[in-house]
Image: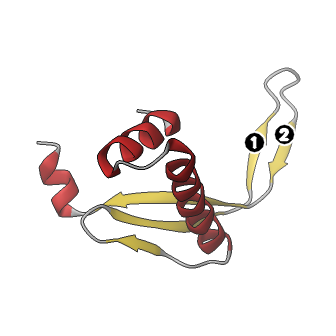
């Protein structure tokens, strides 16, 4: 399922226009992204939680030249499904 499929599914199940469904999905995704960017954890009961983690600066190699380079520290998002969600996949 992709974003378009999700929008269509919500519109069909809620009997609302796809235009409204798209707006709802966009707002949810934007709010999750903004909250993570601000350093907050997002928990959706019955689904899971999103949080950010830090990846430390590290050394790497340029595959073409073999030259050692420094890869800067970064933040990345992580999703952890809740137990109910995991059980539903079994």
Identity of the residue drawn at 38% across and 47% down:
10
Q: Is residue 76 left or right of residue 67?
A: left
The total of numbered circles placed on residues is 2
Please say if the residues under marks 1 and 2 sit with CB atoms less than 8 Å apart.
Answer: yes
Residue pointed to by mark 1: 60
| Residue 54 x, y percent position in the rendering | 62, 66
- Give the residue number, with chain letter if any, for mark 2: 68
Separation of disc 1 and disc 2 at Cα?
6 Å
16 up-or-down from 34: above or below: above
Q: Say which residue appears at 83% left-offset and 50% top-offset.
A: 70
- Give residue 44's position: percent from left, percent from top: 36, 69
Q: Is mark 2 on a helix, strand or loop?
A: strand
Q: Position of residue 48 (x, y in %)?
A: 33, 63
Q: Outermost residue toward the top?
A: 64
Q: In the image, 41: left or right of 59?
A: left
Q: Which of marks 1 and 2 is nearer the N terminus?
A: 1
* Quadrant in the rendering for residue 84: bottom left
Query: In the image, what residue occupies the spot 54% across and 53% down?
Result: 20
Q: In this view, does 75 lie to the left or right of 64?
A: left
Q: Nearer the viewer, residue 59 or 26?
A: 26
């Amino acid at each position: 399922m992709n974003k378009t499929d999700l929008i269509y599914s919500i519109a069909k199940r809620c009997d609302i226009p796809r235009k409204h469904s798209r707006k709802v999905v966009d707002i949810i995704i934007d709010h999750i992204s903004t909250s993570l960017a601000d350093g907050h954890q997002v928990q959706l009961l019955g689904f899971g939680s999103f949080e950010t983690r830090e990846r430390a600066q590290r050394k790497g190699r340029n595959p073409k030249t073999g030259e050692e380079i420094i890869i800067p520290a970064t933040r990345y998002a992580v999703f952890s499904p809740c137990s109910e969600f995991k059980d539903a996949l079994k």
